Amino acid sequence: MASPYVGGEREKLTSKLPASLRQDLKVRAAQLGVDVQDAVADGIITWQAHPIPLPVIDTSGADSFGTWLPEGLYDTFKEDCATREVSYIQGLAQAVRLWLDQHAADAPQSVQQPVRRIVMANQKGGVGKTALSAGVAQALAETGLRVLLIDYDPQGHLSHQLNIPAIDAGEESLVTHMLERDKARGTIQDLAVAIPGDQFEGRLHVLPAAFDAFLLDAGLAMFRGPRHAVLERALSAAEADYDVVVIDSPPSLGLAMDAALYYGRQRDDELEGRSGVVIPVEAEDSSAKAYGMLVRQITALTEDYDLTLELLGLVVNKYDARRGFIATSSLEKWQSLGTPRVLAVNKDLREQREAVRVTQPLLAYAPDSEQAHTMRQIVRELSA
């Protein structure tokens, strides 16, 4: 059915939705590359055109749910609920159920591919690598994928923000598996910590930071063997347990960063666009200089080892147009690059800072916030 609500402003719908429907909606929308608000709007339009009666859905225990509808649709939805003598909650649940029933997820590809590897990289500190790594990993896990999120930065900001203790110096860690495999008593999987949350369902694991990772570059300088491959060697046994590995890299251009970049290279017979580097930047001049330095390092690495390392895209982080000409003109320059493309513009909003303060995942703390939807947009762009 053609929608009469194309374009125009949107207005907020605030209602309630059972947790299972809300989760199924987010997962299916992510799988199909559809924004949740558009999925709900389509569901309501389908519901309005559908003959009655419709099956009653159990809405007991429904939690608060908010989204944005095209202007005018909310009013007609309320009128139709009254006509059909159902509550807004029941009407919304029926609409979402209709949309889910009519939009099945695509069948998984039969071609076996290596674990997907996404490296968040920028040697400039403070550009939002950690927030982006965590948000993208959460959005991937929402879609039903098994995700390993690695805190590769010895500062441990990612571990702290998710309320996970860093591994003490001298204890078994990723560093042990990279430099001293003979001393490792367990596996990488033993070190990973599952992130709680109904929307992740145990699929999101974090490999905590290690305090002795500050010495990783020095250890690699003395390492006997292929230094560039030590991270891949350490993680190889764990790859079968995950669909995606996301690495929150340190603000560095050292040997440890070389190992992370090498890990993200395109492997033999791997499809293009699956693995590589995502670069968070800011809309200001120093980010452009740092970006140039990173690109030079990547170019040198690809030439030295004759490999392909894809730049999957840029994310303009912490954007605020109120900062004036510097911000707006810098954004235009990033967007004009063309390659790599800008995957998303992540605005400087309070929800991310609040999630960090309460040490919760953004998509659990504020699942319907604009920043949470931006993380899902990035995942859709990376999967396109």
Image (tube, rainbow, N blue to C red):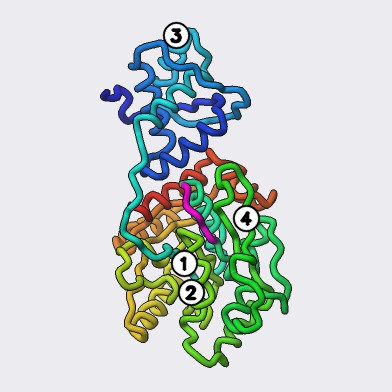
Residue beneath label 2, please?
260
Along the viewing direction, whichever of 287 and 34 lies nearer the viewer: 34
Of labels 3 and 1, the one closer to you: 3
Where, quadrant-wise, is the N terminus in this rendering? top left
Residue beneath label 4, please?
194
Q: Can you tell which mark lies on residue 84?
A: 3
Q: Which residues are magenta?
A: 144-148
* Amino acid type of the residue tagged 1 in the rendering: Val
Q: Can you tell which mark lies on residue 119?
A: 1
Q: Residues within 10 Å of mark 3 (few under 14, many from 20)?
A: few
Q: CA distance from mark 3 to mark 1?
A: 51 Å
Name which of mark 3 and mark 1 comes first in the sequence: 3
* Amino acid type of the residue tagged 4 in the rendering: Ala
Is 360 placed left or right of 288 in the picture? Answer: right
- Residue 145 in magenta stretch: yes
Q: CA distance from mark 2 to mark 1?
A: 7 Å
